[in-house]
Amino acid sequence: MFTHVVLMKFADAADAAKAKSLLEGLTSTIDEIATLTVALDTLRTPVSYDLCMISTHTDADALRAYQAHPAHLEVAGWLKPRLAARVVVDY
């Protein structure tokens, strides 16, 4: 199993809820997603990011297929201009 962790900080934190909805919608479209969890930050501390997404995939090739999928690219196109920062860990 391969795990993909993404933390996102939005220029406008109010965009995080819409991002959560868009990301969760990918599970019904992209077969390469084994599991997907999307959570919003609740404490809102100075070091917090607004959203955490954790997805699992059968292997690195499945992760790459997910990332190249047109539905993912559409969501990414919405996300990217709204992000102030993003960090990723894949293991």
Image (cartoon, rainbow, N blue to C red):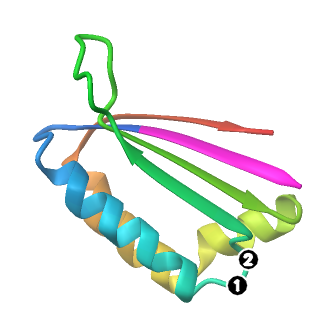
The number of callouts visible is 2
Q: Main secondary structure of the magenta part?
A: strand
Image coordinates for residue 4, horizontal then vertical, percent? 67, 48
- Tag 2: Cα neighbours inside 10 Å, few (<14), some, or many (≥20)? many
Please tell me whether residue 2 belongs to the stretch shown in magenta: yes
Tell me whether the residue at label 1 lies in contact with that at label 2, contact meaning CB atoms closer than 8 angstroms: yes
Using the image as rendered, state which of residue 68 and residue 30 is in the foreground: 30
Q: Position of residue 82 (x, y in %)?
A: 20, 50
Mark 1: give few (<14), some (14-19) or many (20+) Cα within 10 Å: few
Residue 50 in which image quadrant? top left
* Disc 1 secondary structure class: loop
Segment tinted magenta in the rendering: 1-7
Amino acid carrying label 1: it is: Asp
Indicate the amino acid at tag 2: Glu
Place of residue 5 in the rendered image (x, y in percent of width and height, measured from the top left): 61, 42
- The residue tagged 1 is 31
**Residue 29 inside the magenta-drawn segment:** no
Outermost front residue? 42
- Relative horizontal placement of residue 43, taking residue 86 as reference (left or right): left
Which residue bears the numbered disc 2?
32
How far apart marks 1 and 2 lie (CA) works out to 4 Å
Quarter of the image for residue 19 reads bottom left
